[in-house]
Image (tube, rainbow, N blue to C red):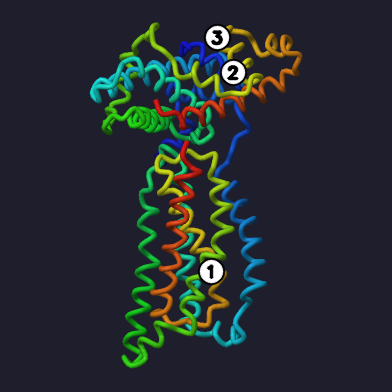
Amino acid sequence: MKAQSAEGPPDDPWSRMMRASIAGDEGAYRRLLEEIGRSVRAMARNAFARARGGDADVEDAVQETLLAIHLKRHTWDPGQPLAPWVYAVARHKVVDALRRRGRQRVEPLEDFEEFLAAPEAEDPHALSDARKLLKTLAPRQRDIVTSISLDGQSIAATAKRLEMSEVAVRVALHRALKALGAAWRRSVT
Amino acid sequence: MKTSEFIAALAADPVPASIRLGRRVAAGIALGLIVSLAIFALLMGPRPDIAAAAQTPRFLLKFVDSFAFALPSLLLTLRLARPDARPDAIALWLIAPFVLLGAGVVVELTVVPQSEWLARLMGANAMHCTRMIPMLAAPILAGLIVALKPGAPLHPALTGAMAGAASAGIAALLYAPSCPDDSPLFVATWYPLATLICTGAGALAGRRFLAW
């Protein structure tokens, strides 16, 4: 690990993309989350299958993990590679998702790197907790999250439609995502 | 909601101003210490013979030992607040204060006649110590828990417990100048008991407030 910091920041693709995201590159962040999502999906599918959990819950676990990664990304040390940090968060969240569904504790495979090589496509028929949990948000927050995710609107367009400033929309979005994370933790499905 | 749609919402949320857990923890301890110092000034204050006591090794051992306990607990707490960190060598440093105190106890048992052992162990006011350290630790623990809220501990209860232990170590440093009892027999009995109370409180607080 010492050698790592002596040679400068880690140079793997994920770490590079996260650094770009922190520097404000929204496109890089989106691509990074898509890639992480694919790896987490493979890992979650594997863990759910071994715990005999329903495949329908996998996508929920993926989204919950992505939200946790998003809300906790400041705990990543940019001097360290991103993948082990992502794996730790993903493992924690997938185990948690299984436990909340009353499954016995199943250890996700340690071989996270393997999942990087074998990404799986999203299940288009999966139902989603996120949609259900959106209902717990305040109406304005729900409107903003729906607008940007389901309707694919930009921050600017959402701000214009709601007659809010862009900053206010971003603040509301951030609060909504935090509230969503809290609601997810409380949910027992 | 499809994951790609969900990601769109995440990507639209700007990166927050970087949160430095270390700084937050330092600030949390500082704020807690202000309250603890006020409690100390109101309820305790230094013992009258502090100038003479400061010359004795028994008195000094209390500080060295509390510091040796507080520092690694605090560093370990910070480690535990990150999901990918391993406790590694810092956990071993936690043995040091116990070895130190154990050595103090052995020396005390050799230099003090057996008839005095119990009196030394019970000291002037054992319950006072057991009550005051948690009271001084409480504001510091509260500061630590608030500071650690943005962290991502894989074991929230354990992280809270370590924060509780660290707050007890710092509180012991504060309490030591007031405590009239210096015998390692007293310190090895009642200080750990007070620390245990703080650790338990920290575990409960961690489970309640640090889960994510």
Residues marked 2 and 1, same chain = no
Residues marked 1 and 3, same chain = no
Question: Where does residue A188 sit, x and y in percent of width and height?
Answer: 41, 29
Residue indicated by mark 2: A25
Name the residue rendered at 67%, 72% in the picture: B42
Q: Mark 3: which amino acid?
A: Leu
Q: Nearer the viewer, residue A62 or B112?
A: A62
Residue indicated by mark 1: B173
Work out whether B45 lies above or below A137. Answer: below
Q: Nearer the viewer, residue A52 or A174?
A: A52
Mark 3 neighbour density, 10 Å: few (under 14) some (14–19) many (20 or more): some
Q: Mark 2: which amino acid?
A: Asp
Whether residue A63 appears in this view of the structure is: yes
Work out whether B167 lies above or below B159. Answer: below
Name the residue rendered at 35%, 15% in the picture: A56
Name the chain letter of the residue that bears numbered label 2: A
Question: Where does residue A116 sit, x and y in percent of width and height?
Answer: 34, 18
SS for callout 2: loop
In this rendering, position of residue B41 left or right of residue A99: right
In this rendering, position of residue A166 left or right of residue A150: right
Which quadrant holds the C terminus of chain A? top left
Whether residue B76 appears in this view of the structure is: no
Name the chain letter of the residue that bears numbered label 1: B
Name the chain letter of the residue that bears numbered label 3: A
SS for callout 3: loop
Name the residue rendered at 40%, 53% in the picture: B90
Label 2 – label 1 distance at C-alpha: 47 Å
Label 1 – label 3 distance at C-alpha: 56 Å
Q: Mark 1: which amino acid?
A: Leu
Q: Nearer the viewer, residue A59 or A32?
A: A59
Disc ID at residue A150:
3
